[in-house]
Every structure is written in structure tokens, then in C-alpha cells.
Image (tube, rainbow, N blue to C red):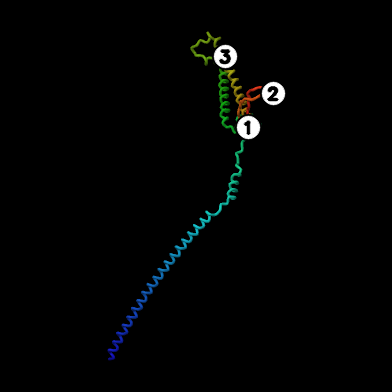
Amino acid sequence: MKTKFKIYQSILCIFVLSLLTNKIHATGVSGMIVLHTIATINDSIDNKIKKDSIIIADIDKDFKKARELEAPVDTALLSSKSDSVLNTPIKASKRWIPDSNKSLWMAMVLPGAGQIYNRKYWKLPIIYGGFVGCAYALTWNTKMYNDYSQAYQDIMSDNPNNDSYKDFIPSYVDIESNKEYYQNTFKNAKDIYRRQRDLSIFAFIGVYLLSVIDAYVDAELSDFDISKDLSLKLEPTLFNDVLRNRPQGVGLQCNIKF
């Protein structure tokens, strides 16, 4: 009997232990399920709160924009800003007005310097081109005058060694038979080139004087007021008699505005 009782007691203990083990396992599983459910609820609550906060922030922004649009416009401030912009002085470019006396002296000392001082640079090629042309004409005419002058002296002399005139006459021409003709020819050529040489000198001086006069006149007229109201008007008019104070005749009246 004792042996059977021990067996039953052992079976009972095993049964109780198995029940307790199953209960503990079930409790652990249910606890995990509960914890997972609670965490899911918390996450959904947090997401809901975040979404609500974002929606509230957007509503606040829209409300602020609406208040800004509905705010009254400060017309006084806008008018003061526009008046300040309109009343801002515009810096006009300063007009260059040269001194005529200074321009005159500069042109006399150095040709073309007056035009540079007056800022009329386009006149420099004309002035220096005139000087170059006169210098070339002077050099050429001087050379030809010297050559024909020496040839005329040689043909007029009786020395046979002085024969530079033969450079101007072909070798097959009989000079002795027409010596007087060639003497007159060389004399005329000498006089022509001498005249052209002198004219070249006067032309050189003329270009120099023109450059000086141009510089002075250009500087003097730089501040001359040329109004846009330049007009000539012809219209009929009545000529009054001063003594009788009545019209004397009809005529044309000329009005000039400058």
C-alpha cells in the first residue's frame, strides 16, 4: 500500500508540475502579446499626435499668411519710398569745356596737341596727313630743282667736263645743234621746280596755321549754346500808324528764333 501511495503521489506531483509549467508558459505568451499590443497602441498614438501637430502647424502658417494679406497697406510708407526714389538726383555726365587759350598755346607748341586737348581725335589723321604730304612735296621739288639747276649751270658753261645735263637727254640726240633750246628747257624746268618748292613750304606753313586756328575756334565754340528752337517764321501783320493809332497797311513779318 505504501508503494502504491508513493506512485500515486509521484504521478500527482508530476501532474501538478505540468499544470504549473503550462500555466507559466501561457502567462508568458499572453504577457508578450499584451506588451506587443500596448507598444502598437503607443506607436499609433504617437503617429496620431505627430500628424495632428503637423496639421496644426500648417493651419497656423495658413492663418498667418491670411492675416498678412488682410493687413492694411501702409500707403504713407509706400509713398515716402516712391518719393525718395523720384527725388534721388541723377548724376549727369559733366560736359567737357576746354580752355581756348590753353588749346591755342598747345597747338602752337606742338601741332595736333590742341586737337588732343579738345578731345577731337578724329582730326589728327587729317592734320598729320597734310604735314606728310607737304613734306613729301617739299623734298621731291627740292631734289628736282637742285638737279635741273645743276644741269642748267653745266649746259651754260664752256667746260666740257660739266656734263650732268646729259643724264636728262638721250645719248642719240645732237645737243650741240639744239643747245639753245635745251638751255631754255633746263631753265624753265629749274624755275618750275623752284616755284613748286616754295609752294610746298607755304602749304606746310598753311597746314600748321590751320591746325592752330582750328584748335582755338573749336575750343572757343565748345560752350556755344545751340538751342533746338531754331526757326524762321513768316506771317502777315498790320502796320499801325503811331500818330493816328490806326492800321496803316498790311505786310509780312519775319521772326527768327536762335
Task: Tell me the crowding category of disc 1: few under 14, some 14 to 19, or many 20 or more residues within 10 angstroms, Cα based.
Answer: few
Residue ID for mark 3? 188
Element at label 1: loop
Residue for point 69% across, 23% down? 241
Q: CA distance from mark 1 to mark 2?
A: 38 Å
Q: Quadrant of residue 143?
A: top right
Q: Quadrant of residue 187?
A: top right
Residue ID for mark 2? 241
Q: Quadrant of residue 117?
A: top right
Residue for point 61% across, 43% down? 89
Amino acid under disc 3: Asn
Q: CA distance from mark 3 to mark 1?
A: 55 Å
Instruction: Identify the mark nearer the N-term, 1 or 2.
Output: 1
Instruction: Identify the mark nearer the N-term, 3 or 2.
Output: 3
Element at label 3: helix
Amino acid under disc 2: Asp
Vertical placement of 198 versus 221: above or below? Answer: above
Q: Nearer the viewer, residue 81 or 74?
A: 74
Q: How many marks?
A: 3
Marker disc for residue 225: 1
Q: Nearer the viewer, residue 220 or 50?
A: 50
The percent position of residue 163, horizontal first and vertical second, equals 54, 14
Element at label 2: strand
